[in-house]
Image: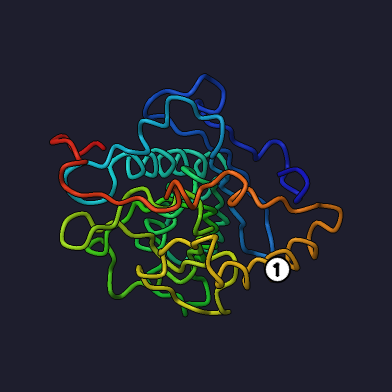
Amino acid sequence: MKDIGVNEARIYVNYFNKVRPQTDSIGVTMGSKTISGDRTLVVIGIRGANYEQEWASNVTLGLTGEAQGFSKSAEMVYDDLQRYVKTISLDLKPDNKLDFWIAGFSRAGAVANLLAKRLVDDLIPDRKSQNANRVFAYCMEAPRGGVASAEKPERDYDCIHSVINKNDIMPYVAPYVEGFMEFIRYGVDHYEPGSDADYKSANADNEFYDTSNQNYTTLKPQMEIQLKAIQPAMTYKDNFKSRGLNNLYIGRMIFDKEHVLKDGNL
């Protein structure tokens, strides 16, 4: 955060980023700085690696509503955010010129997704207002944790972006089974390799890439071009084929009622 101009005195590291992770813990770091004259940027980075026991929370789904483990973690980060803004003399209220920049990877991607949705619901009643708060959320390889019934029709969630590799197992948790367990990601999904610009994907787009088919063979070189653009010295190794993920069907997870325990856990 110091690299983007956040003063060390305005950096907050929560308790669970300082101790060994627990089953239902979540690590987060926050910072803030003034931008564009009178607007305040609030940066929220959520821990998405080395989280040990928190793995259990990934598959704690609950019986109703959002995926319980991710939802509980999002609420904990929201609580941390409320404490943090008080230390820098800000209020979490609509039309307060706050810009929330949120990022998370894997488990943290799901938490970032749910947190961003809460901020949109609570703090952005009117995006056209001159003083409106804004959310910029980037959820990398994010599992599904939301439910369509929680979305508010008067809110716009297009500021929440999830970047998904179709052959990564994590975005398939929690499952989507029509008529049974219909978990979603809020906002817009962007798939790698390559969905079209501004394309708003449907749940059917989660179908994994078969590494033996022509579609994979065609799209892979396009992905390599993008990789070279940002990492010229890197040589791409096709781990999807070399590790046999396609043959193991690890890119796809199929769930039915027999795979879900009565307490809502897988």
The residue positioned 75% from the left and 43% from the top of the image is 2
What SS does tag 1 mark?
helix
Viewed as shown, does residue 255 lie left or right of 41? left
Q: Is residue 98 visible?
A: no
Instruction: List x then y, in percent, for residue 13.
Output: 58, 32
- The number of callouts visible is 1
Q: What colour-coding does the image apply?
A: rainbow
Q: Image check: 213 left or right of 53?
A: right
Report the quarter where the N terminus lies: top right
Residue found at the far top of this picture: 20
Residue that numbered label 1 is attached to: 221
Q: Position of residue 204 (x, y in %)?
A: 35, 70
Which residue is nearer to you in this view: 199 or 83? 199
Mark 1, other Cα within 10 Å: few <14 / some 14–19 / many ≥20: few
Left or right, 257 with respect to 224, comes to: left
Residue located 21% across and 51% down the image: 65
What residue is rendered at 54% in x and 39% in y?
A: 48
| Closer to us: 140 or 126 | 140
Is residue 31 among the parts visible in the rendering? yes
Q: Position of residue 105 (x, y in %)?
A: 54, 47
Rendered position, 183 above or below 84: below
Residue type at tag 1: Pro
Query: Going by the picture, which residue comes out furthest to the right?
Result: 233
Q: Position of residue 223 (x, y in %)?
A: 68, 66
Q: Which residue is situated farthest in the left direction here? A: 262
Q: Quadrant of the C terminus?
A: top left
- Left or right, 219 with respect to 19, comes to right
